[in-house]
Structure formats: structure tokens, C-alpha cells
Amino acid sequence: MPKENILVVEDEEDIAELIRYNLTAEGFDAVCTGSGEEAVRLAGLK
């Protein structure tokens, strides 16, 4: 079964890494970015 993709938008790097770590541990494919503009660009790629 393919992994679900989750896009995390968080400007605090430590918090973003913690979220990404936990989501990955639960089997999700998590991508983090710190800006809304980058999030919109990344969302358009999937």
C-alpha cells in the first residue's frame, strides 16, 4: 500500500522536524517547508 503524503508548513525548524519525524514513524511520507509560497509550489507537484 502506498504511503500517504503530508505537507507540513511550519516556520520553526525544530518543530517541523519533530512533526516530520513523528509522521514518518507512523508511516506517512512527510515533506516540510517553512513558507506558504513554497507550500503552494510543493502542493502543485503532487
Image (cartoon, grey):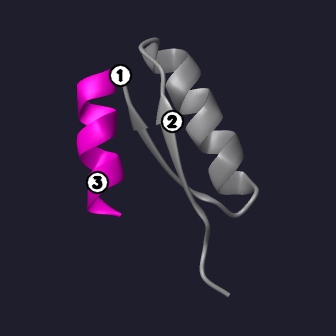
Q: CA distance from mark 2 to mark 1?
A: 8 Å
Residue type for callout 2: Val
C-alpha distance separating marks 3 and 2: 14 Å
> Where's residue 4, x and y in %?
61, 66
Q: Earlier in the sequence, mark 3 or mark 1?
A: 1
Badge 3 amino acid: Gly
Q: Is residue 40 magenta?
A: yes
| Mark seen at residue 43 | none
- In the rendered image, the residue lying farthest to the bottom is 1
* Predominant secondary structure, magenta span: helix
Question: Residue under circle 2?
Answer: 8
Residue found 52% across the figure and 30% down from its top: 17
Helix, strand or loop status at disc 3: helix
The x, y position of residue 6, in whole percent, is 55, 50
Q: In this rendering, would 40 be left or right of 31?
A: left
- Mark 3 against mark 2, which lies toward the viewer? 3
Q: Quadrant of the C terminus?
A: bottom left
Q: Where does the image place residue 22, in percent across and percent down from the top left?
A: 70, 42
Q: Amino acid at mark 1?
A: Gly
Task: Please tell me the numbered disc located at residue 34.
Answer: 1
Query: Could you tell me which residue is drawn at 43 percent across and 37 percent down?
Result: 32
- Mark 1 residue crowding within 10 angstroms, few (<14) / some (14–19) / many (20+): some
Residue beneath disc 3: 44
Confirm whether the magenta stretch covers residue 34.
no
Report the span colored magenta: 35-46
State the residue in front, 1 or 43.
43
